Amino acid sequence: MAKSLVSAEYDGGTVHYRLAESTGTYAARRLSGSLYREKARRHFAVRTKDKLQIAEREWSSQTSREWLGKYRRQIDDVRAAIGWAFDPAGDAALGVELVVAALPLWQELSAFREMLEAIDLAGSNSAALMGLAPLGRAKLSTARAWAMTLARHMHPQTDDAWRESIFHANGSRDAEFQIRSVCGQAVFLAYAGRPRTALRSMNEFAAAKALDWTMAPDGKRLLAHIKIYAGEFNSASAHLEALMDDWGHLEEGHGLSRFQVDLPAGIRFSQAFLSWLQGDSDRASRLAGQAIDRAADLDHMISLGNAISLAALPIAFVEGDLETASQLQRQLADVSRRESVGIYEGTARFFAGAIQSSRGEQAGFTLMQDSISGLLRGNWRARVPFYRSLLAEAYLAAGELQLAEDSLRAVLAETGIRDERWWHPDLWRVAGMIAAGNRRPDKAMRYFQTSLDCARAMGAGAATKRTRLTIDATDFG
């Protein structure tokens, strides 16, 4: 350092040492022909693994920002060490341990494609994999299932991957990983349009383990969010209000949720989603904005993508704030380009089309329909009934009654239509609008009344208001 051969950078009490590029290149060339080269590379891989294992122990006790500030730079070392370990001259067993140790770093960086490639590489070395401890197998299988769930096109074997994750988690006898695997499977089931199946799985697990979800706040937040999809608004509200009091303080911060989402951000966008459905759009927009700001500050793309796609963007669009919706749509499209998560890409494309159609642009209808088809091809069935109903309403606004009817009829074929109850009042409302357009006033009124009854039963204040406004604006003559 005194001779400037090595430079030092101080970051929050941590010292990072580095060589200048020219010096590093020269040193690497000198090492290339040396008898010590392989020994040096092995020591480097072992040291990298040791650092990652220390990082994992600190993961649950530090905020995401603190943890990433300390370990973000390790990613290049991870890539180099894994590249050597799985080389024919390397050590595959050490490589498998490296992959397991690096899982928290990939998850914090939202680097799911890279993580899945590394997991597949480790899985192809069956002899090395056999020597892995049960907990290591549980970590590897759970991370693999997450990577498959959050891929651009949800892998057709994702259901099997989660069952394998649960199997290895049970074999590890690690309580935390058992919770992680069951809740991860619940996320997958919700994305696949089966929220009530997800709830049943979580409730059965809690009963079998005598688990109080209050002791697992990430799981409790997930449970509340899935309850919203299932139309259980009051129960979801009680969970989220308690979570906001205990875990929602932004200034304190917490580590990343073990279900890929920062917990304070997750509480906020779930609460925003629910508040909007209950009729408090101002609170919903405020909470969604807080979730976005926190996720952006953490630079955590999965938290940011969820906050926009699951709360902020649909709220802005349905409430008629097209300027904000356009801004959020572009932000979500950028997240999608960075992460290649299929549900973000499909949602961004759908709302791009919805915004176009709201402005009278015919191309928007095709974009909306194509995005729905793309989501279904990727097995992303969550919210598809919601999107089809928005498409039907857009057709109605354009005077395309038959296309609106076709779009709404397609909802009946959706796998999760009975499970995803949160938008049922609006499906009945749009059905009433179509019936009125077909000059069937009695049928239209029955549909509108069913919408109101359904909304009241769930406590969906926003849907009640929309249906009443629609009744007032409908010509029954």
Image (spheres, rainbow, N blue to C red):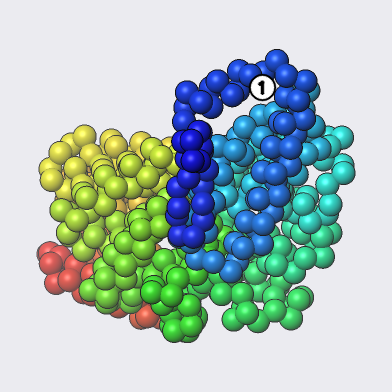
Q: Secondary structure at mark 1?
A: helix
Is 1 situated above or below 104? above
Residue 279: image x %, image y %?
28, 76
Question: Is 199 situated left or right of 299 in this image?
Answer: right
The residue labelled by disc 1 is 31
For the question of whether residue 143 can be seen, the reply is no
Q: Residue at x 66, y 34 (%)?
A: 81
Question: Is 383 situated left or right of 259 in this image?
Answer: left
Residue 111: image x %, image y %?
52, 43
Report the front residue among 298 and 328: 298
Residue 310: image x %, image y %?
39, 59
Q: Residue at x 17, y 54 (%)?
A: 322
Assess disc 1: are there few (<14), some (14-19) or many (≥20) residues with their C-alpha within 10 Å of its C-alpha. Answer: some
* Badge count: 1
Q: Quadrant of residue 119?
A: top right
Question: Is 9 situated left or right of 106 in this image?
Answer: left
Amino acid type of the residue that numbered disc 1 sits on in the rendered structure: Leu
Q: Quadrant of residue 90?
A: top right
- The quarter of the image holding the C terminus is bottom left
Q: Residue at x 29, y 56 (%)?
A: 313
Question: Is 122 situated left or right of 5 in this image?
Answer: right
Q: Residue at x 45, y 59 (%)?
A: 12
Residue 115: image x %, image y %?
60, 41
For the question of whether residue 53 can be seen, the reply is yes
The residue at the far front in this view is: 2
